[in-house]
Image (cartoon, helix red, strand yellow):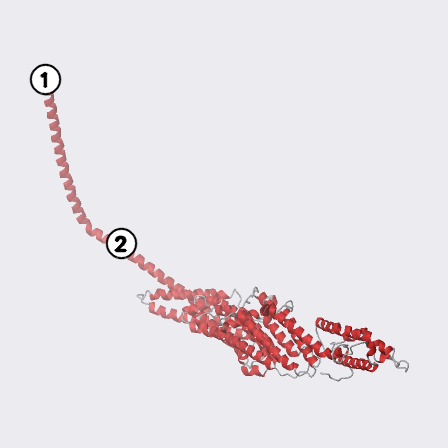
């Protein structure tokens, strides 16, 4: 019973589900039909709306075109307005407000570029012509403004201003370095500070720079070049003239007295240092600042500005280097060579460009020519010393003027030894120190040879030896007290000291041998034997001979001179050490013979023969070599 009921219930539920599914399918079919209807209607609507959409898009495009046209018109009108304002500023000229004037030129260039890029605008050609004409006028006024501004602020530098830029040791009023040697002065210059003068006020430089830039942009480089060159070169030359620089030819130099020429050379060295380290350096600085950005013009303009001034300075050096050589010129040649070497790095820096090549090479050429002339002067000097034939009379046997001249020359050479070594390196790859030693040795040897010749002029061989002793001693003493000793060495000094002693010994032998022989009691001409066996006449004769000879020596040799006090005392002592003991012994041995002689009874005075005591002789020896002038002007040379 229960199962049939359950089956009935299940059938009823299945029928219900089937009915529901049928209804759902019906609804779905109905929705599909409705949606299909909507799609058809939308397609129809879209077809109907398409013309409207096309019209709407066209209207929108038209609006956009109108907006663009209005904006373009606004830009064009703005350019017209800017052109009008720029024109007003340019017509007023640059003098009142230079910065605004330069801005107006920049604006004109911008307007020209704009209209050049918008040639489709029917009035663009007319506007372009107007702007270009206006720009041409503006640049012409700009050139004049650049010329006036540069001219007004370009003034020659007064010498006092230049001196203030120098280190203290180089200022004319400075006296602190007066006692310094040449080498010490050169060392102090190595740390010296040079401060180039302000050639143009710093506030003006930016304006000149902007003006130069505008001229270059306008294609007016040649006008810029000419204006800058003419003004700055003239001012530079005036500064040098105020300083005392002048153009001198070789003929002018040859005609000048040596004292005048020497002063001019000293001034030239000073002027070269001022020109390169101050004036040329200052010109390079302002040239770089004003022409910054105009790179093609900077170096050629600087070269043109400085060319004539460099030529004037170097031409003087060339005239000196080519002039007639003479020994006194050697040191000024070395000074000139030295300043050229000192300025070499600055010249290379300032004139390092291709445009300045000619000036750079001219300075190098002058340096080498000075070195060559100085080296040739060395050879001339060595030859002149050996062949010197001056007849300067040195009657007293003192140091000859040639000796003091040559030795002072050598001492000065060693004050320049750093420069000399550089000079030797210009032409010789060997050791410059060895070259300096060889040159010095040859010069002193030439002096020795000349002094030997001069010594033969004396008739008295004793004076010959005294003369050589004095001169060689002066040479040795001077070398020992100078830097030459470091080069020539101790061995050289010792050898020449022995030569001095040899001449002193020769003097003593030649001058005193005869008188000592007179006092001798041994050997040829001596008495020998006992004093009682000697005749009084012989003793008198010996005393008379001694007195005559000694008085003659005293009279003559007290007029001779040994200028060095130590050498003079040494020579007197050497003579006294042999003369006084011999005289004392002679008096002790034979003086009594005169005292017991009948001559006393006859009223004769033995002091007539024994005229001098030992003390008298010692006192008179101390008068030797003093260069005294007696009333009797006889010469014993």
Decide: is 77 above or below 414: above
Secondary structure category for the residue under label 2: helix
Apparent side of residue 537 relative to residue 314 in the rendered image (left or right): right
**Residue nearest the viewer, comparing 107 with 616:** 616
x and y percentages locating residue 448 in the rendered image: 62, 77
Examine the image and state in which quarter residue 157 appears.
Answer: bottom right
Q: Quadrant of the N terminus?
A: top left
Q: Quadrant of the C terminus?
A: bottom right
* Dot label at residue 3: 1
x and y percentages locating residue 444 in the rendered image: 60, 75
Residue at 38% across / 69% down in the picture?
Answer: 131
Secondary structure category for the residue under label 1: helix
Decide: is 257 above or below 484: below
Q: Is residue 610 visible?
A: no
x and y percentages locating residue 636 in the rendered image: 73, 83
**Residue nearest the viewer, comparing 308 with 406:** 406
Mark 1 residue crowding within 10 angstroms, few (<14) / some (14–19) / many (20+): few
**Residue nearest the viewer, comparing 116 with 79:** 116
Q: Nearer the viewer, mark 2 or mark 1?
A: 1
Residue at 24% across / 53% down in the picture?
Answer: 57
Examine the image and state in which quarter residue 540 appears.
Answer: bottom right
Apparent side of residue 494 relative to residue 65 in the rendered image (left or right): right
Instruction: Answer with mark 2 or mark 1, whichever residue precedes in sequence.
Output: 1
Residue identifier under label 2? 60
Q: Is residue 24 visible?
A: yes
């Amino acid at each position: 019973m229960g199962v049939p009921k359950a089956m009935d219930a299940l059938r009823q539920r299945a029928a219900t589900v089937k009915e529901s599914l049928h209804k759902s399918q019906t609804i779905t079919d109905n929705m599909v039909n409705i949606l299909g209807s909507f799609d058809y209607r939308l397609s129809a609507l879209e077809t109907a709306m398409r013309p409207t959409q096309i019209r709407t898009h066209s209207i929108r495009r038209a609006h956009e075109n109108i907006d663009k046209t209005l904006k373009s018109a606004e830009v064009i009108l703005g350019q017209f307005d800017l052109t009008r304002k720029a024109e007003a500023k340019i017509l007023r000229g640059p003098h009142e407000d230079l910065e605004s004037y330069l801005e107006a030129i920049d604006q004109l260039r911008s307007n020209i570029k704009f209209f050049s890029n918008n040639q489709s605008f029917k009035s663009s050609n007319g506007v372009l012509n107007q702007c270009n004409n206006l720009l041409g006028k503006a640049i012409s006024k700009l050139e004049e403004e650049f010329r006036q501004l540069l001219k007004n602020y370009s003034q020659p530098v007064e010498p006092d201003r230049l001196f203030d830029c120098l280190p203290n040791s180089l200022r004319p009023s400075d006296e602190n370095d007066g006692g310094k040697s040449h080498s010490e002065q050169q060392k102090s210059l190595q740390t010296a500070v040079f401060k180039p003068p302000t050639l143009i006020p710093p506030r003006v430089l930016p304006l000149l720079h902007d003006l130069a830039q505008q001229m270059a942009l306008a294609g007016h480089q040649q006008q810029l070049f000419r204006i800058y060159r003419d003004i700055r070169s003239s001012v530079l030359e005036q500064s040098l003239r105020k300083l005392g620089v002048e153009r001198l030819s070789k003929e002018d130099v040859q005609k000048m007295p040596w004292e005048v020429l020497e002063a001019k050379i000293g001034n030239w060295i000073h002027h070269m240092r001022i020109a390169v380290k101050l004036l040329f350096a200052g010109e390079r600085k302002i040239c770089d600042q004003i022409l910054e950005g105009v790179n093609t013009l900077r170096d050629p303009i600087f070269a043109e500005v400085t060319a004539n001034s460099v030529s004037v300075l170097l031409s003087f050096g060339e005239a000196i280097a080519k002039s007639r050589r003479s020994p006194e010129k050697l040191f000024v040649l070395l000074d000139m060579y030295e300043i050229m070497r000192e300025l070499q790095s600055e010249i290379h820096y300032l004139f390092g460009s291709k445009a300045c090549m000619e000036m750079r090479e001219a300075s190098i050429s002058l340096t080498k020519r000075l070195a060559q002339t100085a080296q040739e002067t060395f050879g001339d000097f060595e030859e002149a010393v050996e062949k010197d034939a001056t007849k300067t009379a040195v009657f007293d046997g003192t140091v000859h003027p040639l000796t003091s001249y040559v030795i002072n020359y050598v001492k000065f050479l060693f004050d320049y030894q750093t420069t000399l070594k550089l000079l030797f390196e210009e032409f010789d790859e060997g050791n410059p120190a060895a070259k300096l030693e060889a040159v010095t040795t040859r010069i002193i040897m030439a002096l020795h040879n000349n002094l030997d010749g001069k010594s033969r002029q004396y008739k008295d061989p004793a004076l010959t030896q005294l003369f050589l002793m004095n001169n060689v001693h002066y040479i040795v003493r001077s070398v020992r007290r100078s830097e030459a000793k470091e080069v020539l060495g101790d061995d050289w000094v010792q050898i020449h000291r022995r030569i001095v002693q040899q001449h002193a010994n020769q003097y003593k032998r030649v001058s005193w041998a005869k008188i000592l022989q007179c006092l001798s009691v041994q050997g040829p001409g001596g008495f020998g034997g006992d004093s009682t066996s000697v005749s009084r006449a012989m003793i008198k004769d010996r005393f008379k001979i001694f007195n005559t000879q000694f008085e003659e020596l005293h009279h003559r040799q007290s007029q001779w001179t040994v200028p060095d006090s130590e050498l003079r005392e040494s020579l007197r002592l050497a003579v006294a050490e042999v003369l006084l003991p011999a005289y004392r012994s002679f008096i002790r041995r034979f003086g009594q013979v005169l005292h017991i002689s009948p001559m006393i009874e006859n009223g004769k005075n033995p002091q007539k023969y024994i005229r001098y005591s030992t003390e008298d002789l010692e006192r008179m020896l101390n008068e030797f070599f003093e260069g005294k002038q007696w009333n009797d002007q006889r010469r014993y040379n």
